[in-house]
Image (cartoon, rainbow, N blue to C red):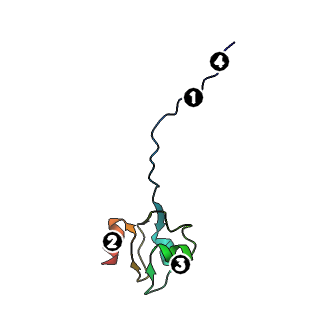
Amino acid sequence: MQLLQTPKSRGFKSAKPKNHVISIKAINSNYKDGEIVNKDTLVEKGLILKKGTPVKVLGAEKLTVKVKIEGLKMSESVAAQLK
């Protein structure tokens, strides 16, 4: 009689949650000039589910609305567009 063994778990799984990615295209279509982009407004507009998840703004598109991004990580190209 052959004994069944449980397979070994391979790899590494980080305990830190991954960043939720928000594109510039989503910001352009959901926000108007003068609005503030933060976790609260992202939840209100349905772009993220919970405020507790880390968020990063990415994108190579052009930011067409004048918004202020608060408390979010962003790529260097997005940061350069906000200046």
Residue type at mark 3 is Asn
Crowd around label 4: few <14 · some 14–19 · many ≥20 (10 Å): few
Q: Position of residue 11 (x, y in %)?
A: 46, 37
The earlier-in-sequence mark between 4 and 3 is: 4
The residue at 39%/72% (across/down) is 71
Q: Is residue 63 left or right of residue 51?
A: left
- Closest to the observer: 31 or 45? 45
Say whether marks 3 and 1 touch (CB < 8 Å): no
Q: Could you tell me how far apart the alpha carbons at marks 4 and 3 are, in whole angstroms?
A: 58 Å
Residue 7 circle label = 1
The earlier-in-sequence mark between 3 and 1 is: 1
The residue at 44%/52% (across/down) is 16
Residue 63 circle label = none
Q: Label 4, on which residue?
A: 3
Residue 79 circle label = 2
The residue at 42%/70% (across/down) is 61
What is the secondary structure assignment of the residue under circle 2?
helix
